[in-house]
Image (tube, rainbow, N blue to C red):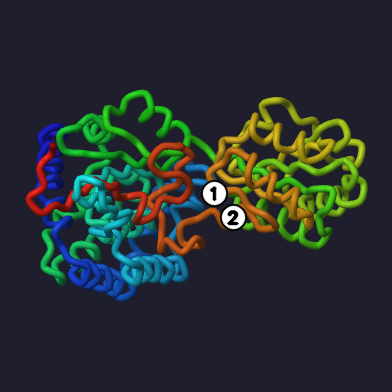
Amino acid sequence: MDIQDYMLTVGRQAREASRAAARADTNQKNRALLAIAGAIRREAPALLAANAEDLAAARAAGLEPAMLDRLTLSEKGIAAMAEGVEQIASLPDPVGEISDMAYRPSGIQIGKMRVPLGVIGIIYEARPNVTADAAALCLKSGNAAILRGGSEAIRSNRAIAACVREGLAAAGLPDTVVQVIDTTDRAAVGHLITMREFVDVIVPRGGKGLISRLLAESRVPMIQHLDGNCHVYIDDAADAAKALAIVENAKTQRYGTCNTAESLLIARSRAGELLPPIAAMLSAKGVEIRGCAETRALVKEAGAATEEDYATEYLAPIISVKVVAGLDEAIAHINHYSSHHTEAIVSENYTTNMRFLREVDSASVMVNASTRFADGFEYGLGAEIGISTDKIHARGPVGLEGLTSQKWIVLGNGNVRA
């Protein structure tokens, strides 16, 4: 296979298919989505079998536990994948939505119309569910998609892609509306991220190494986040039971996700009371604690935290802990060390909570809730194409609206400018 010729063909097909996707009406798109979900449910045994082959190969290659966790499909996960596609079908169609219409003194009426971005390239590692999520979100938002999964998930992605093609055919849409790159050659990525004539935006979902490479090499605009160093801050006015439950869920529900808490801050006035039981819970679950001097005085098993620890996304059972004077120091610490992904405060003080929401500079900011809720499905988006820590165009979980833009429209009746 000549990779350059192959990718140019994929790009041309995607550009042509994007026009079909953009003119498809809501009913046609929803028919395709429901057919995709039905195929995923029906083909669950085949998806599990393909995934088992991927997992066996990944274990033999020595992939890390966090990557294996992301790669794994289960019956529950496949059902959730299908449910996510069905939820996207049930969501309002953003394409063609007109807003902010107003008359001007000249007599013209101006407003904005929501339109697809065009062709979206998604580059991702491990998670095969991204194949279904990305296909469904791009389709519902009227875009064509080029999906390039990691080599470790090639069999799973092929099996899911077959379900997607079946759904597109059932609705009379070209199968090139969603194309899954059928090669593990890394050169395919290099071509995809430089094909400005065919690709309108790149969405990377993967590790820091992948995203760093794309930031350096891509000639196509990106919606991305580099890592997820998420914080939980326990305030002076925290409820003890809520604090314990939120830290437990935010850190230990899953270690390998970008919305897992990697850092814990606690107000000095509550540290003596709350830190020992929280540390005991974390230690019982096998979490290594790395803390400041005050933390180590209260938690004997804690190691010393370095500057690097406070800035690290571990994706592992490790957490950095710091005792802070209060809200001001917590906000300053978060804004300095955070990757601007997701932060949470545990507090019963309304004024404190509002300050935290306003002043913490992250894509998702939460009050009395686990950082693990920073997810497109949990936010009611059906699924997410990715999470953005950028401030321009889209921020946080990117769903249907984030895959569209707005253009100005003008309605007149023979009006001419004086």
Task: Kindly identify the residue that appears in the image at 11 percent across and 47 percent down.
Answer: 415
To which quarter of the image does residue 37 belong?
bottom left
What residue is pinned by disc 1? 257
Q: Label 1 to label 2, Cα distance in Å? A: 8 Å
What type is the residue that disc 2 sits on?
Answer: Arg
> Relative to 133, is 354 on the left or the right?
right
> Relative to 295, is 263 on the left or the right?
left
Image disc number at residue 372: 2
Quarter of the image containing the C terminus?
top left
Residue extending furthest toward the left: 414
Viewer-proximal residue, 19 or 194?
A: 19
> Relative to 132, is 261 on the left or the right?
right
Task: Kindly identify the residue that appears in the image at 48 percent across and 43 percent down.
Answer: 63
Quarter of the image containing the N terminus?
top left
Mark 1 and mark 2 residues within 8 Å of each other at the beta carbon? yes
Image disc number at residue 44: none
Residue 278 x %, y %:
81, 52
Residue 212 x %, y %:
43, 28
Viewer-proximal residue, 379 or 9?
A: 379
Q: Which structural element holds mark 1?
A: loop
What type is the residue that disc 1 sits on?
Answer: Thr
Q: Earlier in the sequence, mark 1 or mark 2?
A: 1
Neighbour tally class for label 1: few under 14, some 14-19, many 20 plus, Cα within 10 Å: many
> Relative to 36, is 293 on the left or the right?
right
Residue 78 x %, y %:
40, 67
Does residue 181 appear anywhere in the picture? no
Q: Which structural element holds mark 2?
A: helix
Task: Kindly identify the residue that appears in the image at 28 percent across and 47 percent down.
Answer: 406
